[in-house]
Amino acid sequence: MSQVIRVALLGVTGRLGRAIGRAVLQAPDFALTGAVVRAGSSSEGEDVGEWLTGTPCECIATVALEEAVRDADIVLDASLPRMTAATAERLAGWNGPPLVSGVTGFDADEQVRLTAAARRLPILSTGNFSLGIALAEALVRQAAGRLRAHDWDIEVEETHHRMKPDAPSGTALLLGRAAAEARGEDLDAVATPGRHGTTGPRKPGTIGFSATRGGTIIGEHAVRFLGDMEEISISHRAFDRSIFAAGALEAARWMSNKGEGRPAGLYSMQDVIAVA
Ligand SMILES: NC(=O)C1=CN([C@@H]2O[C@H](COP(=O)(O)OP(=O)(O)OC[C@H]3O[C@@H](n4cnc5c(N)ncnc54)[C@H](OP(=O)(O)O)[C@@H]3O)[C@@H](O)[C@H]2O)C=CC1
Ligand SMILES: O=C(O)C1=N[C@H](C(=O)O)C[C@H](O)C1
């Protein structure tokens, strides 16, 4: 790997991809050397710098993954789940560059494929690149581990813009999983995904999720610990997508490990903040 981290970006035309693309172009220790767009995209063949910042960067958008990653040290992924799973498999098959993915909403099959690819490829996958959320996750783990499980009910709430396709958000799931693991539970066994109708009293030990969609809200999360006559809430609000982009670059720096790289495996933002 070179001193400058050379990035191939997937999903560069999307909301997160545009934010990451601009951050890569502005960071002195990064260079954008590849960008993948969907087959038939009107952006194919365009200089990505030109339409992201108004300044050409000689990175031409392509539909060909192999071409986009040819000179890359890291692949940054802001696409959608099917693209992520397929890309991870192809990169693992080529012994290609590590993958840093912020994509959420994987179904069980896509998650299995991503995990299998990580046996051969270093993959950092996170529902949220924000360093603030990484800290919130650690705080949730600590709180859930210390509070007696059946005295404190846990509810995870999230709000996002009207275009978000998946619910609960990837962040809500990672926060819920942190709480469940701290209690020695498997999230799938204790999660209550939503309530409607005559649901009866709350089942002790469950972790509830609720999602609101509307407007242009970038991302709000709260983990509420509801006890008898008291409440603790750990919450986070994203005011701009640039925070995700900044965290994505931090994750890429960690993955690059000063050019040494990391062994194959599945990493998270907890690995990144452990040394930040
Ligand atoms: N980890 C984090 O911090 C964050 C994660 N996210 C997650 O990132 C993902 C993207 O979110 P967002 O940017 O809002 O979504 P968008 O729909 O705005 O962007 C998705 C991007 O993926 C591209 N894409 C989708 N399918 C393919 C394909 N088969 N081949 C090539 N390109 C493809 C789209 O291309 P086209 O424009 O042509 O459709 C677009 O560029 C979501 O999973 C979201 O939850 C979002 C914000 C922060
Ligand atoms: O789709 C989004 O916009 C976001 N998705 C991520 C998630 O699913 O948690 C992160 C962020 O909240 C924005």
Image: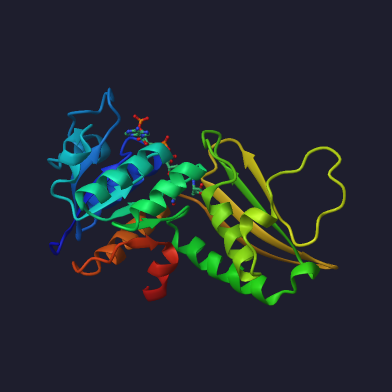
Name the residue rendered at 82%, 54% in the picture.
202
Residue 66 vs 144, above or below: the answer is: above
Q: Position of residue 141 (x, y in %)?
A: 59, 70
Residue 179 vs 19, above or below: the answer is: below
Name the residue rendered at 80%, 61% in the picture.
204
Is 186 displayed left or right of 276 in the figure?
A: right
Q: Is residue 108 visible?
A: yes
**Color theme of the render:** rainbow
Task: Place residue 65 in its image quadrant.
Answer: top left
Pick the quarter of the image with the C terminus: bottom left
Q: Is residue 54 visible?
A: no
Name the residue rendered at 27%, 33% in the picture.
37
Q: Position of residue 45 (x, y in %)?
A: 17, 29
Is 126 displayed left or right of 73 in the figure?
A: right
Pick the quarter of the image with the N terminus: bottom left
Q: Position of residue 166 (x, y in %)?
A: 54, 39
Name the residue rendered at 31%, 45% in the picture.
89
Is 189 displayed left or right of 201 in the figure?
A: left
Q: Position of residue 57 (x, y in %)?
A: 15, 42
Residue 203 vs 213, above or below: the answer is: below
Foreground pick, 74 / 83? 83
Residue 211 vs 43, above or below: the answer is: below
Task: Place residue 53 in its image quadrant.
Answer: top left
Q: How many marks?
A: 0
